[in-house]
Amino acid sequence: MATSSRLARLGASAFAATVALHPIYSENDRGGGSGLEAAKRKIAESDGLVPSRGVQESVLIGASSANPLDILVVGGGATGSGVALDAATRGLRVGLVEREDFASGTSSRSTKLIHGGVRYLEKAVFNFDYGQLKLVFHALEERKQFIDNAPHLCHALPCMTPCFSWFEVVYYWMGLKLYDLVAGPRLLHLSRYYSAEESSELFPTLAREGKDRILKGTVVYYDGQMNDSRVNVALACTAALAGAAVLNHAEVVAFLKDEATDRIIGKEFETYAKVVVNAAGPFCDSVRKLADKDVQPIICPSSGVHIILPDYYSPEGMGLIVPKTKDGRVVFMLPWLGRTVAGTTDSNTDITMLPEPHEDEIEFILDAISDYLNVKVRRTDVLSAWSGIRPLATDPSAKNTESISRDHVVCEDYPGLVTITGGKWTTYRGMAEDAVNAAIKSGKLNTTNDCVTQKLRLAGGYGWDPSFFTVLAQQYVRMKKTHVGNVVPGLMDSATAKHLSRAYGTLAERVAAIAQNENLGKRLAHGYLFLEAEVAYCARNEYCESAVDFIARRCRLAFLDTDAASQALPRVVEILAAEHNWDKSRQKQELQNARAFLETFKSSKNAQFHDGKHD
């Protein structure tokens, strides 16, 4: 049964953690070769078969004050999962607990870009700010490693910057050439200028005239793009394959000192660790307060809203980024998984589990992109809209505590509790490395090797190349059950094969085998490539414990199209019920929870909005 958990107790030599389990309704190998080769071998030999949830739970229960884990990670987002992978591949005994699901928070609600930070480079140049320049250098280095380590889930994306004066042409061309120069050997592709005519061919919906301005040309540069939550899930699963005990739907509610917690929800067990790494994102202050209720908060939450539009808003393989709109904000439109993602906002917000976009934020994005397009921008075209919380942080050790950093912060304001927060998706690996280094120092931990994650591919990445989809197309068929119960063969067409290859890497063969051998080759929603087989595969191999886990984080239907996700839900629940032995009551609860979750995604189908210029 899927569970949630609590953690507790601060001891002299170890953190004791009480883990409470309740139904969800809403030992490492230290031997062999170099650290990197040992990690590669361990992951490869597993064939992607992660330890079961029960096994992972048993490892956490088995940790005691006499035999504690080296590190317990709190938070299963990008950074937390990255910490678990880094620590496990250094030969440490590692556990990870996540209150909801891997990537259930900020890590699934990103811009989907892997970027060095063009804006930071601009600030570095004009403010003579070496700190900002260091941020760009580091991010560009991490960008290249990110793409190399998850090649099936990431790719280079050309981004077009429109110029409406010759000054802008020169300004952006020089700035983006500097961006190329700073990237050095980590360059993805060279930036270049395109005339207005060439730009219209590359981006047909880009307006050439409007509001007393005429397009002079564009400068195209390259950054990376990813399927964020699937990278996060791959991180967690790779950490599990490397020996970490990862457990989603496990909530930390207390660090126990001398007394047991008096707040009981369901089952509880205790686990012990020498060091706890707090990687809870926007919620890291809540975790810090479990150790010291008087600790000063370091999180300054910021809301970022994104919307999904039909594919015709942007061409396949070309994004549009406007560095400065009329009110000084950045706006972008990027092709993503067959649709267009547009954003974003940057505003103060409260920290909540399920942030919702406000209608004025959606209208702002529609207003901003309409200034640059020759198509009518309509609120009714919004297929999905979501809000994510950026955990901007202040460094508690800094002299100026009012300064909010775009860099990450590592601190230890309670002995044995290391907090890592701030930063951005692109630099998750470097953040994790810094956090593990701090944990090793704090707990005087013994490792078998130094960090190896710079060149460690995630599960599904080894042996993968862009032509891998042809193996699926040639060797598998999709066996589908009709509504009357007959089984008919269906073609494993190129589009479906590419989708599976891009989502699962070399492990896609296992999904294709389920589609063929278990008659789960039918698509879940009209107009989308997601297969029934993916539900079964994710339940067995990716710790998918609820319907929301699947529609939001394993496939991306909730983010791409709330209406399609709602239509797919009954079949998703039916397959998960078969995999997890759910009774009718649990199935009904899963449907209710998933539909309530989808209500927080303000598509044109489930949002209240007034008639206006975007209707």
Image (cartoon, rainbow, N blue to C red):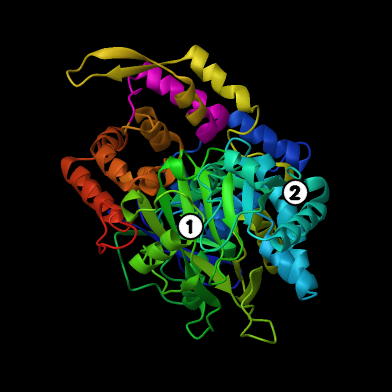
The magenta stretch is: 500-523
Q: Which residue is mark 1?
A: 369
Label 1 element class:
helix
User: Is 424 colored magenta in this rendering?
Assistant: no
- Is the residue 467 above or below the residue 253 in the image? above
Give the residue type that dot 1 points to: Ile
Q: Position of residue 259 (x, y in %)?
A: 42, 76
Let me know if residue 514 is in the magenta part.
yes
Q: Is residue 107 left or right of residue 251?
A: right
- Measure how far apart labels 2 and 1 are at the Cα level: 52 Å
State left or right for residue 598 relative to residue 450: left
Estimate the x, y position of residue 332 in percent, counting from the top left.
54, 55
Binning the other alpha carbons within 10 Å of mark 2 as few (below 14), some (14 to 19) or many (20 upward) gives some
Of the residues shown, which amino acid type is indicated by label 2? Answer: Thr
Q: Main secondary structure of the magenta part?
A: helix
Name which quarter of the figure residue 444 lies in. bottom right
Farthest residue to the front: give it: 212
Residue in the picture at 42% in, 54% down: 307
Report if residue 26 is visible in the image: no
Q: Between disc 2 and disc 1, whose residue precedes?
A: 1
- Graded by Cα atoms within 10 Å as few (under 14), some (14 to 19) or many (20 or more), the crowding at tag 1 reads many
Position of residue 133 in the picture relative to residue 389 (left or right):
right
Q: Residue at x 57, y 47 (%)?
A: 319
Residue 488 in sight in this render: yes
The residue depicted at 55 percent of the width and 59 percent of the height is: 72
Q: In the rendering, at what x and y percent does residue 265 appear?
A: 30, 63
On the image, which quarter does residue 493 sit in? top left
Judge depth for marks 2 and 1 and give the one in front. 1
Depth check: give the residue in front, 22 or 9. 22
Q: Judge whether 12 appears above or below 428 on screen.
A: below
Residue located beneath label 2 in the image: 448
Q: Quadrant of the C terminus?
A: bottom left
